[in-house]
Amino acid sequence: MFGAPDKKLGFGFMRLPMRGDQVDVETTCRMVDEFLAAGFCYFDTAHGYHDGQSEAALKEALTSRYPREKYILADKLSPPFFKTEADILPLFESQLAACGVEYFDMYLMHAQSAGRFEFYKSCRAYETAFRSKEEGRVRHVGISFHDTAEVLERILTEYPQLDFVQLQFNYLDYEDPQVQSRACYEVCRRHGKPVIVMEPVKGGRLAQLPDEARALLAGVSDSSPAAFALRFAADFEGVKMVLSGMSSPEQMEENLRVMGSLAPLTDRERAAVEPLRRILTAEQLVQCTGCGYCVSGCPASIRIPDRLAAYNARLRGAPDAAARNAAVQGGEPSACVGCGECEKSCPQKLPIRRLLALAAREFA
């Protein structure tokens, strides 16, 4: 189902290397080659990633260059690309064509939450996916999930035939009362569902620790901050895959080193998790992972993740924060019209309109 059991790293096609506003396919091809040569085979995409470029880039870098049996491919049924039940199969067919395959190994109901689950049910999306599985055009049906453990319990109870669950899971979110990583993981274990981890480095935040956290980690571990986060996520029973959106060959090389000879956390490393979490929580940064789901529906075309990243840099006292904000290609935070479309699609449930107002004041 997931490939070799000791090869837990998945290549997420959500944060690919870029040339301007276009995916750098040449570099992506090299990274795909290196990934496969190291014995890994799991690839994850979605229709809206990189403003619709991800599936096409995957076809160019992977499926047109390697036999079908060499890789495992996951794609997703994502809003806002369907409105009714009648829209789902044409979308699914277009995804197969865009990726250049005849079937998906894994097909996910994307970013499920209480409200989104009701919408998917009203469109009979789950039933449509299960029919595609019966027809052999999908091998395994699962969900990606962003809500409370109570909502996840409901979904897995109503649809016990689901094959797996993809969770946001990292040491910062493990006890977070909003993300509920630990509680959601425990629901999956009770239902016997394999777990795929997304956001193990929380959009890169756990790779860029403040000085106090970096010093604490260096005192107990030889791992880099990113490697430590990956090892934490992989070190749980039932976790079958850890996705990483790799934006450069250097990131891939580090991830392959870590996940190619995966070592469990030592007792000293495990004891450092809670102090690290306390340090990071005290920073009170915006908990944006840079997924970009908020961007497509923004009428002012604000590059919200980039603006919030610059705002976080200002909160951390970075001297180049204003320059980083000025370099963003997209509407200024002050251009927000307050429609709230971004907040409807935010997996982290961030009050984006309020945060943009704060950023606008900071960079005025």
Image: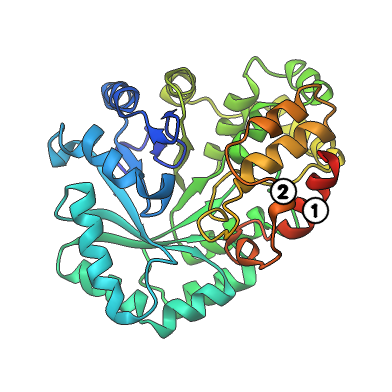
164 left or right, relative to 346: left
**At x 41% / y 63%, what residue is drawn?**
78
Give 305 or 269, whichever is nearer the viewer. Answer: 305
**At x 47% / y 79%, what residue is drawn?**
119
| Residue 308, image quadrant | top right
Give 5 or 27, whichever is nearer the viewer. Answer: 27
Q: Is residue 165 above or below residue 235?
A: below
| Residue 260, image quadrant | top left
Q: Secondary structure at mark 1?
A: helix
Looking at the rendered image, the quarter that the C terminus falls into is top right
Q: Is residue 74 above or below residue 126?
A: above
Q: Secondary structure at mark 2?
A: helix
Residue that mark 1 sits on: 357
89 left or right, relative to 304: left
What's the distance in space between the residues labelled 2 and 1, CA to CA?
A: 7 Å
265 left or right, relative to 197: right
Asked whether residue 171 appears in the rendered view, the answer is no
**At x 45% / y 26%, what residue is drawn?**
259
Give 20 or 115, whichever is nearer the viewer. Answer: 20
**At x 69% / y 62%, what residue is drawn?**
337
| Residue 13, image quadrant | top left
In contact (CB < 8 Å): disc 2 and disc 1: yes
Q: Residues within 10 Å of mark 2 (few under 14, many from 20)?
A: many
Q: Residue 225: horizontal and vertical position, in percent?
A: 65, 24
Q: Residue 285: horizontal and vertical position, in percent?
A: 79, 42
The amino acid pointed to by label 2 is: Pro
Residue that mark 2 sits on: 333
Q: Earlier in the sequence, mark 2 or mark 1?
A: 2
The amino acid pointed to by label 1 is: Ala
